[in-house]
Amino acid sequence: MAFKLSELNPLMKAQTEGAQRITTWLAMLALVLLAAEIIVILALFVTPKTSPIYNWFVPIILVFLLVFIAAYFNERKLSSRQPSAESTAHTKIEKQIKGHWFEFVHNHDRIAFSVSEIGYDKSQIQFLLQGSAYTKDGKKAATWSSSGCAVTNLSVPEFKYFWEGEHYKGEGSDKTFSGIGVIKFPPLKSAPIFKAKGWYISGSISDLDFTGRYKVDFVKCTKDEVEKIEKDDSVWLKERYEKWRNSFEND
């Protein structure tokens, strides 16, 4: 039996609600059993040992205890399988923004743009950014990656991240540098997002010494552009940068 696309969302919603109801009932059952066991334990202390029902209390307590433990751990197991609201929101964001981006810099005296990749690490529950920076001639100048990223305003995603980098070996320097950055995406839609804006600060976080604040435009790379980027063609990278610069200056 095949489902139409329009039928999948209600089906998934119904399954999620069903699992949540089971989780709720198991939690209530565990609480009821715990209360019943407390009552039975109290009855055990006040019932004379000569009473014919006295010997039944211990087996009842053990049964209640075993059922309580089973209900409790089943409820915990089901709860752990339910995605949190934050992870669900991150998944929606990931589907629309993951991949390669051009990060065009407006006002840096040496770095013209970066080719950045945005991904998501479920084990760390955070987005990861990494990239290579280029001069206006399309030559690689530095590499960098995020060391921490937080997302604010999940419906209109905004990334706030720390980053660390080092100058490319071909530039004859292994000096490291670091900073903070912000990426502001447009509101989430059903289709992927292709543009964003932001800024970053470069220098040294540990020394609280920064060289400047740089405005950037983000443009999502097409599949063809990603293939050309992987070839590290400096001529094409220079042409792509000039295309953006001309478009920016004509706006």
Image (tube, rainbow, N blue to C red):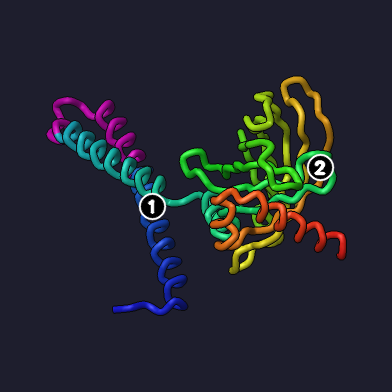
Picture coordinates of residue 239 (x, y %)? 72, 57
Picture coordinates of residue 224 (x, y %)? 56, 63
Which residue type does callout 1 highlight? Thr
Q: Residue at x 77, y 57 (%)?
A: 242
Q: Is residue 165 in view from this perspective?
A: no
The label shown at residue 23 is 1
Q: Residue at x 65, y 24 (%)?
A: 174
Going from N to C along the chain, the mark reached first, 1 or 2, is 1
Circle 1/circle 2 CB separation < 8 Å: no
Q: Is residue 56 in view from this perspective?
A: yes
Q: Residue at x 41, y 47 (%)?
A: 79
The label shown at residue 144 is none
Q: Nearer the viewer, mark 1 or mark 2?
A: 2
> Observer-nearest residue: 153 or 112?
112
Mark 2 is surrounded, within 10 Å at the Cα level, by few (under 14), some (14 to 19) or many (20 or more) other residues, namely: some
Left or right? Give the position of 155 relative to 109: left
Which residue type does callout 2 highlight? Tyr
Work out which residue is located at the far top of the displayed protein and give it.
207
Q: Which residue is mark 2?
A: 214
> Observer-nearest residue: 109 or 127?
109
Does the stretch in magenta take in 50?
yes
